[in-house]
Image (spheres, helix red, strand yellow):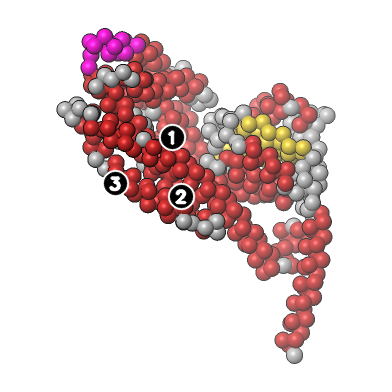
Amino acid sequence: MAGDLMLKILRLLLVVFAMLVGGAAAAFAVTPVDVVVEDRAGILDRNTLVPAINAIEFYSPTKVAVYTYNGSAADNLNEEVLRFARTKHPEWISADGQKWADGLYIFALDPVGRHVGTYMGEDRKVSLEQRDDIQNATKELLRDAQWTDGTIAGVRRGAELINQPWYRSAAFVITAWVTGALAALGAGAWLIVRAVTRAGSRKEVERGDRSYASVSTDLDVTELNARTIPEDSRYGSSVLEKHRTFLNRYNAATGLSNRVHALSPRALSRRSSLKLAREYADAAAELDALDDVISDSNALLNRGSTWPTAWDRQLAPFRNDLAGLEQLLSKRNGQGDSATAAALRSFRDQSIRDIEHWTAQLADGKITPETALDRLRDARTHLSTLLKSHAETVIEGFAKSERETKLMRKEMQEAQEGLDHRRRTYEPSILGTVYPSYYFFSVPVFNSGFNTGVGSVNAARGGGTTGYGSSGGSFSGSGSSSSF
């Protein structure tokens, strides 16, 4: 008897649930009235992003704006979004200049400073907790540098929460449909994760295929180049040592290629498959870089006809570091007026002259290729020392306590020592092959360590930011940002 009563109650609940879901479906059916993408950071795939956003359904007609820019970990993203809107898109701001325009939802992203922000018109605003929810929905993807997918996830989650009907609210779900709602949400999240994972797996397989095809095409040429690298050269012998495992690694990459291409579309949705696809892509990319190094070693050490091109490739990482110094020093909290900054600028100017001098001497036969590589190694080692000194300067300038100093120093040291191997890439140069990845402290690694350190300190200071900074004035539009 009790069992029959329970069955009737469950059936009644299912009927009511179906009615509510049906009503929700009717309300959840308004695609964006407009989509504006201002990708100033140059990180988004518009061909994927715009159609995906246009297909997302909101509860109310909503204009979606996406803004990205390359800032720094110390920036206030809220302030930057408001500055950009005032300058480039005044229509994003209400007529009185105090709020965001009605009907607007802005998703903002700073991939360098590692900030994500969400901003809404007064008729579209959600609670601070819900803004956190939207931002948190993107962070796993953003931490993995999946900028386009992370942006889509942020817009999708915003659509789910902006002007959400009462019967779709968290409070109602928790009190009335705990079990059913949790199952549905779990299934929905599971489907989203699987879709994102499948797309990521395919991208990694495509990346691996490009590198693997290049290596396979040049396989015979790579073997010929290796045979003529002088073994009595200190650099040549090191490159040849790497080459001795080349075929074994190529065979291993072939095995990985066979495994990933045997995966079904369903299997590609698994995290283990994404890991395997990345392993394949990374292995193929490193082989592709190594065969270029073998070619350059042959050309440069034997002074072949293409040695100037090979030499330019050896200089490229150092030149990139020198070119990136001013941006590093001029950023907020970059301590650009310090003594260590002056030392870096002086070194940069001297190094530019040195590069021209080494190249001319190499062309005239006044120095050997080994000597030129020695000088390049010494210069990059000196730059590493100067960057480490400047790291201490910026840490002292930003940290407000001994605890913050230790936290930032830890992040900078981990970047210097290459402890986060997932973020380190093989440098396709002779020096990058001869020396371990952590041997040279580069400008990109400095920026990564500094941004991570500042982000960690900001998180420790209290997490998200809701204000619009000193330039915001009396502006009080609904919005906030947080680090990822």
Q: Position of residue 425 (x, y in %)?
A: 40, 37
Q: Which amino acid type corresponds to the residue marked 1 in the rendered image? A: Gly
**106 left or right of 18 in image:** left
**What is the x, y in percent for residue 128?**
68, 46
Residue behind mark 1: 449
- What residue lies at 45% left-to-right and 43% top-to-bottom? 208
**Percent from the top left, x then y, of residue 23?**
82, 60
Furthest toward the bottom, the residue is: 1
Q: Residue 256, position in %: x, y?
A: 40, 51
Badge 1 marks a residue whose secondary structure is helix
User: What's the CA distance linking mark 3 and mark 2?
Assistant: 19 Å
Q: Secondary structure at mark 3?
A: helix
Q: Earlier in the sequence, mark 3 or mark 2?
A: 3
Q: Is the Cβ of the residue at disc 1 closer than 8 Å to that at disc 2? A: no
Per the rendered image, the range of residues in magenta is 356-368
Q: Residues within 10 Å of mark 1 (few under 14, many from 20)?
A: many
Cα separation between marks 1 and 3: 35 Å
Q: Quadrant of residue 54?
A: top right
| Quadrant in which the C terminus is drawn | top right
Q: Amino acid at mark 3?
A: Asn
Q: Amino acid at mark 2?
A: Ala
Please indicate whether residue 188 sits to the left or right of residue 30 in the image: left
Quadrant in which the N terminus is drawn = bottom right
Q: Which residue is mark 2?
A: 277
Residue matched to label 3: 248
> Is residue 366 within the magenta segment?
yes
> Gap between marks 1 and 2, in whole Å?
27 Å
